[in-house]
């Protein structure tokens, strides 16, 4: 069975990826939208301009297979496009999952031109606090790794509340006190997707769920798995490049005894990654991805897909040598983009969390016995 649903290696916008085991796609993409996505490659503004149309194809909750096929297809088209639109879709899912309706009209987030981000990173040398003042919440402090801050209109942001918990808030980025800081950005991959630090000086914000809800919610695991679907799509694009290069060699009657071996290895790894995503989509929709079980599922699948992506990059280098990295700008950009995107995998830290979840389950089973 082919890992991919369409075979044109250099016309990625011509069709969508399937994650289903039977090869059928869950998403019927309008051809004009796919064409606009291809045209948006590498361009933040152009990608944001079509985010609303992509969101219309993507359920905020449920139908997880469909959601991940959307994300994988975006990434196969272009990783900058995926990296721009994925957090917009994630924010809509978070807002839709909130236990109480979020009054978005209070921050002007009801129009069709709203561009969402999700900023949940934190570091030891910066801190963002949410403080109740005169019957409303305001944000004070700095938030690191605020992807796309110069281009967005709104964001879901996590901040520390007076009780010490982390809580999610929706905030308008044109509100008083919001300032995007001049943060050095020297990335060679995803070069347009800048992630500066943002300073909040008493900026009005609206709670999204109670204290601690953001990290406990079932959708937290789903969000991490959606990023893995993007990694998968980016690796698929690289495999298509390898397949195209090897097919060209065969048409030129160039003997290549080793190249097909690399192609087979990459295909096998991506097949395993796709199967993991397909199974996890079914588990998510069955309510399995909650609590420690959801954390363990997300970490397992993310580790599998990340390893497949990293190995795809390595094996392509072995199979094709330095030429495409030095002479093919599109290929070199895809490799660099995927290398940066894969660093959203927390590697050993996620493995540790998985082990801790397994031990907690073991202890509970022991107590029950």
Image (spheres, grey):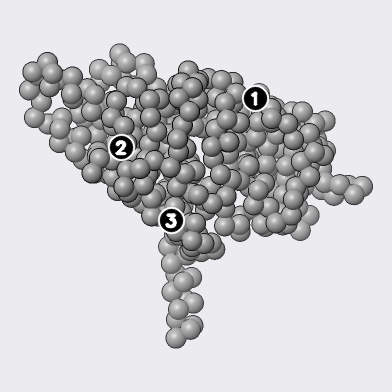
Q: Tell me the quarter of the picture where residue 26 sits.
A: top left
Residue 94 badge: none
Q: Position of residue 285 (x, y in %)?
A: 49, 56
Q: Secondary structure at mark 3?
A: helix
Whether residues under marks 1 and 2 lie with C-beta atoms below 8 angstroms apart, the answer is no
- Which of pointers 1 and 3 indicates the residue nearer the eye? 3
Q: Position of residue 246 (x, y in %)?
A: 18, 25
- Element on which disc 2 rests: loop
Is residue 162 positioned above or below 232 on the image? below
Going by the picture, which residue comes out furthest to the bottom?
369
Residue 49 lies left or right of residue 72; in this view the side is right
Indicate which label's residue lies in the foreground, 1 or 2: 2
Residue sitting at x 37%, y 19%: 330
* Position of the N terminus by quadrant: top left
- Disc 3 and disc 2: Cα gap in Å? 19 Å
Where's residue 243, x and y in %?
23, 28
**Label 3 Cα neighbours within 10 Å, binned few <14 / some 14-19 / many ≥20:** some
28 or 212, nearer to the observer: 28
Q: CA distance from mark 1 to mark 2?
A: 33 Å
Question: In the rendered image, which residue does mark 2 sit on?
Answer: 4
Residue 353's place in the image compared with 366, above or below, is: above
Q: Quadrant of residue 86?
A: top right
Residue under label 1, please give it. Answer: 151
Quarter assignment of residue 185 = top right
Q: Is residue 255 left or right of residue 46?
A: left
Look at mark 3 in the image and give the residue it sits on. Answer: 282
Horizontally, is 102 left or right of 32 in the view? right
**Is residue 116 something one can see in this rendering?**
yes
First in sequence: mark 1 or mark 2? 2
Measuring from the top left, give residue 68's x and y in whole percent.
Answer: 46, 43
What is the C-alpha distance between the residues marked 1 and 3?
35 Å
């Amino acid at each position: 069975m082919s890992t991919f649903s369409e075979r044109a290696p250099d016309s990625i916008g011509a069709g969508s990826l399937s994650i289903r085991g039977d090869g059928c796609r869950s998403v019927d993409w309008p051809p004009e939208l796919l064409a606009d996505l291809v045209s948006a490659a590498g361009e933040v503004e152009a990608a944001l301009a079509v985010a609303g149309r992509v969101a219309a194809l993507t359920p905020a909750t449920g139908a997880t297979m469909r959601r991940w096929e959307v994300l994988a297809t975006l990434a196969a088209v272009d990783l900058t496009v995926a990296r721009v639109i994925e957090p917009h879709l994630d924010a809509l899912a978070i807002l839709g999952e909130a236990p109480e309706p979020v009054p978005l009209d209070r921050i002007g987030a009801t129009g069709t031109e709203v561009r969402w981000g999700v900023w949940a990173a934190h570091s030891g040398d910066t801190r963002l606090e949410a403080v109740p003042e005169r019957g409303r919440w305001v944000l004070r402090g700095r938030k690191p790794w605020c992807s796309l801050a110069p281009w967005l209109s709104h964001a879901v942001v996590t901040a520390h509340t007076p009780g010490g918990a982390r809580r999610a808030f929706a905030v308008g980025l044109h509100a008083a006190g919001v300032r995007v800081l001049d943060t050095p950005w020297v990335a060679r991959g995803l070069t347009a997707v800048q992630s500066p630090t943002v300073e909040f000086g008493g900026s009005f914000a609206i709670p999204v769920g109670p204290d601690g809800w953001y990290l406990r919610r079932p959708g937290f695991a789903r969000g991490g798995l959606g990023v893995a679907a993007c990694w998968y799509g980016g690796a698929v694009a690289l495999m298509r490049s390898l397949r195209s290069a090897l097919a060209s060699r065969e048409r030129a009657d160039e003997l290549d005894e080793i190249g097909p071996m690399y192609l087979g290895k990459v295909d096998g790894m991506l097949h395993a990654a796709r199967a993991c995503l397909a199974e996890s989509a079914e588990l998510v929709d069955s309510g399995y991805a909650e609590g420690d079980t959801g954390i363990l599922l997300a970490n397992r699948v993310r580790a599998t897909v990340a390893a497949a992506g990293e190995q795809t990059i390595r094996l392509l280098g072995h199979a094709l040598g330095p030429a495409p990295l030095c002479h093919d700008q599109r290929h070199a950009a895809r490799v660099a983009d995927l290398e940066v995107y894969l660093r959203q995998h927390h590697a050993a830290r996620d493995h540790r969390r998985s082990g801790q979840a397994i031990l907690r389950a073991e202890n509970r089973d022991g107590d029950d016995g």
